[in-house]
Image (cartoon, grey):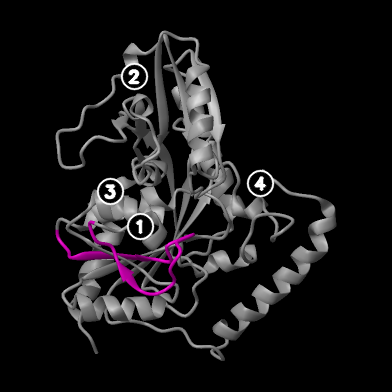
Amino acid sequence: MAATRSILLYPFSVLYGIITGVRNYLYNSGILHSVSFPVPVICVGNLTVGGTGKTPHTEYLVELLKKDFKVATLSRGYKRATSDFRIATPSSTPLEIGDEPLQIARKYPEMLVAVDRNRAEGIGRIMEEAPDTEVIILDDGFQHRKVKPGLALLLSDFGRPFYKDHMLPYGNLREYRSNARRADLMLITKCPKNLNPVQKRLVLKETDKAPYQKLFFTSISYKSPVPVFGSIDSDIRYFDLTRCSGSGIVLLTGIANPGPLKEYLQKFFGEIVDLAFPDHHSFTEHDINSLEAAFNSIRSASRFIMTTEKDAVSLREMTEIPESLRSAMYYVPVGINFLFDEKGKFDELIIDYVRKNRKNSRIS
């Protein structure tokens, strides 16, 4: 069940729902216009605030498509200090383009990664700068109604599904549950790996999906930790978790829900000290002092610092981190797995959409 807040916030939720409802009505009725583009546009989004796994699912789409198509990604660049259109470069920083776009750009340096608060203008700029682009992945653009995507993916966390949530600020919904009908594909993310068919049918019933919508289930896949300060271009020294039973760690996170990562790491480490910050946190020198104190408090003979791939992007920008901490810092990469042997079905839907529509990939 999604977390709710004080009942005193409920009237504000009603007001917020009216405002978003009127806005969606204006778009649905054609009073406000959505723009379509002559290039395949895949939107990855959600109805709730907080992490539903958009970045690992976006990266999955990139991995799926980049072998056969020229891919670009476009996002708002959450919490960046700029607001205009920007293309990621080797010298880009989180303050310029945001931590998640920078993570994608560093992982796929051959791909165009752009940010723009106005996604419609951003798509136009991408087609000007890279007219041979064959598909654009729109990260977190479900509420950006100015753009009409060719294929809309709606993500919902299994542990806090949209259909059991309430409008902001009482709940976590950005818009009414009924707007899930705008999605072509629904993905229930962060599912237990042992989700059974009975649970699957219950979720299928509660989503109340339309006949034209397809529903998929994914789980998180954690990979071997990687040094935060290792060279991106050099051979990466992977961390052997199976040999860490007598070790302790500081779990340093700035994400919406660090619980699943902590639960995973508890299988390998006997001592874990939590140091959790809000989502998209910009680390400060004071935070590093707190990290050093937490690190020194670990009683185990072997000590490490584990963080997320998104947080590693911001931490690499900091010069205040002493070498004693740098050498102990690792991030845990995240991937996704499709449940019920439906990976092939999902992949086929995505590839078929791009292949059938890329012939129009040119400026009108």
The disc labelled 4 sits on which kind of residue?
Ala
| Quadrant housing residue 312 | top left
Tell me, yes or no, whether the highlighted magenta stretch contains residue 83.
yes
In primary-sequence order, the first of circles 2 and 4 is 4
User: Would you call the spot at circle 3 few (<14 residues within 10 Å), some (14-19), or many (20 or more)?
Assistant: few
Does residue 216 appear to the left or right of 69 in the view shown?
right
- What's under tag 2, amino acid-wise? Leu
Query: Which mark is nearer the camera, 2 or 4?
Result: 2
- Which label lies toward us, 1 or 3? 1
Q: Give the percent coordinates (x, y) of residue 25.
A: 62, 81
Query: Residue drawn at (71%, 69%), measured in percent from left and top?
Result: 16
Instruction: Identify which amino acid the numbered label 1 is placed on.
Output: Pro
Residue count near mark 2 (Cα–Cα under 10 Å), binned few <14, some 14–19, many ≥20: some
Residue 241 numbered tag: 2
Residue at numbered disc 4: 2
Q: Nearer the viewer, residue 354 or 332?
A: 332
Amino acid type at circle 3 is Gly
The answer to which of marks 1 and 3 sits earlier in the sequence is 1
Residue of label 3 = 344
Q: In x, y percent, where is residue 124?
A: 31, 81
Q: Nearer the viewer, mark 4 or mark 3?
A: 4
Q: Which of the 4 quarters of the picture holds residue 139?
A: bottom left
Q: Quadrant of the C terminus?
A: bottom left
Above or below 138: residue 161: above
C-alpha span from label 1 to label 2: 28 Å
- Which residue matches tag 1? 101
Disc tally is 4
